Structure formats: C-alpha cells, structure tokens
Image (spheres, grey):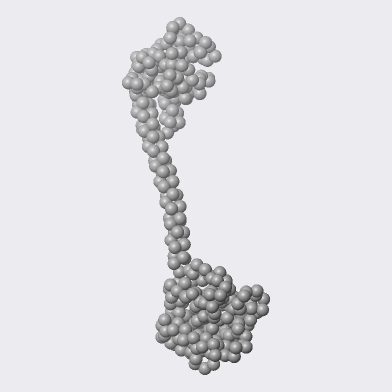
C-alpha cells in the first residue's frame, strides 16, 4: 500500500476509534487496520492482564492464538511491553526471543510487535507474515502510530466503562434507597392509618367513638342534604348497665355492650354510621333512610326479643331508643339532632321506668307523640 494511502487508512482508523466506547468495536478496528496498513498476512490485538498476555482479537489468513493467554516472559508481546519498544523478527526460528513451538502450528515466519503506550504499556499490536519479511522503518512508524491511537481509544473505553459502572452502581443505590423509602412510607402510612383508626374507634365494640362519629356524620349529613335525601338519627341507651356491673361485674357488662353493638350493626347498613359515644350510649346516622321511625323501632324490638330468647346471659338486653328524622329541607346541625334524639330517648327510658313491673324487660316501648319521636 502506498505510504499516502496508509496515512489515510491510519487517519480513518483513528477517527473510527475516537467515536467508539466499547472494547469489542475498538478491537475490531485495530485488528483490521493493523493488517491493512502494512499489508501483513495477520494481525493480533494483545491486552495485558497482570503478568499474562491475552490475545483478544485477530485478523489473519489462518487461526493464530485468539482467546489464549501466555506468560509475559514467554511471548514476544510480553517482551515488547516490558521493554516498551517495538520488536522486529525477520525469522522467528532464528530469534532467541521467540519460542518456535508456539509458531509451529501457524503460518507465521516473520513478525512485528509494537507496544500500546510506552509508559506502562497496556497491550501490544502484532503483525505476521507467512513468508520471511523485514518490516521497514515506515512499517514500524505506522504501526506505532496506530498503537498510540489505540492507547487513547482503549483508555476512553476504560473511562467510559468505569463511568457506566459508577452510574449503574449509583442507579442501583438510588433504586434501593427508593425501595426502602417506599417501604418506610408504606409503614408510616399504615401506622398513621392505624393511629387514625384508633383515634376514631371504640376499643371495646370496634364501632366509631364520639370523635369518629361527629367527624364522619357531619360530612354524611351535609352530603345527604345536597342529594336532597332524608336521614334518621337514632340514639340508644343500654338499660341497666350500671346495675349489671354492680351485681355481676364489668365483664358481664362489657358483654352486654358488645351484644348491643352487634345488634345495632345487624339492624343498619354498612353505609350507616354507628358509634358508641358513652359508656352505655349509642348513636346511629342512617343516611338515605327509607324506613320511618316506627319501622326502625319495630325491627329493633323484634331483634332484641329474639336475642333474649336465645341468650344465656344473666341479665336480658334492653335498649331505650329515641329517633329524629331529618328531612333534606332542614338546616338543623348534627349537634341539634343528637340532642333531640337524646331527649326522645330519655323520655322513653322514663316511661319504661314507670311501666308495669311485669312488662317484658327486653321490650322497647313504642314511641308515643313528641316525647319519643321528634320530626325536624
């Protein structure tokens, strides 16, 4: 190849390597250019791995040593790297620096090996001929120029690889941190939800407590009025709880409270807001309620009677109940409705206390007039 053409080929190889960031592509550019620049029958790219020479790539008329490793002290590429200068061997079988048994299976008769970088070499580029050939100074200069360009390309590959590795490590660290943060957020959210649930829940019955009732019922009442829907507010008091606690102990009294809570939950929908707002007092906001007060009271009365017939409690269950119906037109506040239902409940409780002693203890007295049923 004419010297000017060789320079143009060298320039093209240098440009190609400057645009490449992976070792495989750089190695392919080097092996092709190394053979074409000086018309060799073969070319190899050798990389240093500690005290070994690794033949990473080759372009030749027949197989050479691609993929093999040799100790630096036993191969010519190691000699070039250790001495940091090119080595020309016209006859491999007559040069003391070569091992003939290494070349016997190959076509190689002559070679030129140049180090990649003269300061702390990182590899070497080899050229081989099938016939004896004496590489010229021009050949050596072209190959050393290619090796110098290769050193920069390989260094760029190393730096790019390190940067990519650092980016991957950092990305993995950030992803791990994000996963930990997501778990912590979930745990914190669950803890906050649990705290919020506890703050609005009665521990004994799992109904809403006073705080929970007023928080949710206010919203539901306003929403029902916007929908032009009727609501009913039911206030219930567990009769005889104090006497039961005094006579049988608080464990029996707690059982009565839980039974009353279950009974209320059976008689109202999941969308209704049921709460225990005192030791023996319950309140229900029935939204979009279709039943009138008499129907609600009758259903409760029948359920309590059925419960008492099947119960083995030492004291029968009894509730005093007051109901207030809230049409959509009213502007009465939730506190007003609760107060009116409470008043109706106490009116019924008072009536039951003055009733015949033989009256069924678990029965609910039907409301009579405005004492037990307020329509707002």
Q: Which residue in the rendered view is the most extreme toward the right? A: 310
Residue 358 percent location from the top left of the image: 62, 88
| Residue closest to the eye, 165 or 337 | 337
* 252 relative to 113 in the view: left or right: right
Q: Which residue in the rendered view is the most extreme toward the front? A: 247
**In the image, residue 32 above or below residue 95:** below
Give me the residue at 44% from left, 7% from top.
Answer: 96
Instruction: Say if residue 254 shows up in the picture.
Output: no
Residue 26 percent location from the top left of the image: 42, 30
**In the image, residue 127 above or below residue 265:** above
Instruction: Say if residue 57 shows up in the picture.
Output: yes
| Residue closest to the eye, 2 or 103 | 103
Give me the residue at 64% from left, 78% from top.
Answer: 308
Q: Which residue in the rendered view is the most extreme toward the left? A: 119
**In the image, residue 236 above or below residue 250:** below
Give me the residue at 51% from left, 23% from top.
Answer: 67
Q: Quadrant of residue 2?
A: top left
Q: Quadrant of residue 240?
A: bottom right
The quarter of the rendered structure image containing the N terminus is top left
| Residue closest to the eye, 78 or 282 | 282
Task: State the count of labels.
Answer: 0
| Residue closest to the eye, 97 or 290 | 290
**In the image, residue 99 above or below residue 357:** above
Residue 202 percent location from the top left of the image: 49, 69
């Amino acid at each position: 190849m004419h010297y000017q053409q060789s320079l143009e080929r060298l320039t093209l190889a240098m440009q190609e390597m400057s645009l490449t960031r992976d070792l495989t592509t750089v190695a392919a550019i080097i092996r092709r250019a190394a053979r074409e620049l000086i018309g060799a029958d073969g070319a190899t790219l050798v990389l240093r791995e500690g005290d070994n020479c690794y033949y990473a790539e080759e372009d030749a008329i027949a197989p050479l040593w691609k993929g093999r490793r040799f100790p630096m002290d036993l191969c010519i590429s190691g000699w070039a790297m250790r001495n940091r200068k090119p080595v020309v061997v016209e006859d491999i079988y007559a040069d003391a620096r070569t091992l003939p048994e290494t070349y016997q299976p190959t076509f190689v008769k002559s070679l030129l090996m140049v180090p990649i970088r003269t300061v702390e070499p990182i590899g070497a580029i080899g050229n081989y001929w099938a016939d004896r050939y004496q590489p010229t100074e021009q050949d050596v200069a072209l190959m050393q120029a290619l090796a110098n360009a290769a050193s920069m390309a390989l260094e760029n590959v190393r730096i790019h690889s390190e940067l990519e590795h650092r980016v991957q490590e950092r990305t993995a660290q950030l992803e791990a941190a994000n996963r930990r943060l997501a778990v912590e957020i979930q745990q914190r959210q669950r803890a906050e939800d649990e705290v919020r649930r506890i703050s609005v829940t009665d521990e004994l019955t799992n109904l809403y407590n006073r705080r929970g009732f007023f928080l949710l019922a206010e919203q539901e009442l306003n929403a029902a009025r916007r929908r032009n829907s009727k609501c009913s507010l039911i206030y219930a008091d567990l009769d005889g709880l104090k006497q039961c606690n005094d006579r049988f102990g608080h464990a029996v009294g707690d059982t009565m409270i839980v039974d009353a809570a279950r009974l209320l939950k059976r008689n109202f929908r999941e969308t209704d807001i049921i709460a225990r707002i005192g030791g023996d007092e319950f309140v229900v906001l029935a939204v979009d309620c279709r039943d009138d007060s008499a129907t609600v009271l009758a259903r409760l009365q029948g359920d309590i009677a059925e419960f008492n017939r099947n119960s083995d409690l030492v004291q029968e269950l009894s509730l005093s109940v007051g109901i207030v119906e809230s049409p959509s037109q009213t502007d009465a506040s939730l506190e007003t409705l609760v107060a009116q239902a409470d008043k109706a409940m106490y009116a019924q409780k008072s009536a039951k206390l003055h009733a015949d002693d033989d009256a069924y203890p678990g029965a609910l007295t039907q409301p009579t007039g405005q004492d037990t049923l307020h329509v707002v």
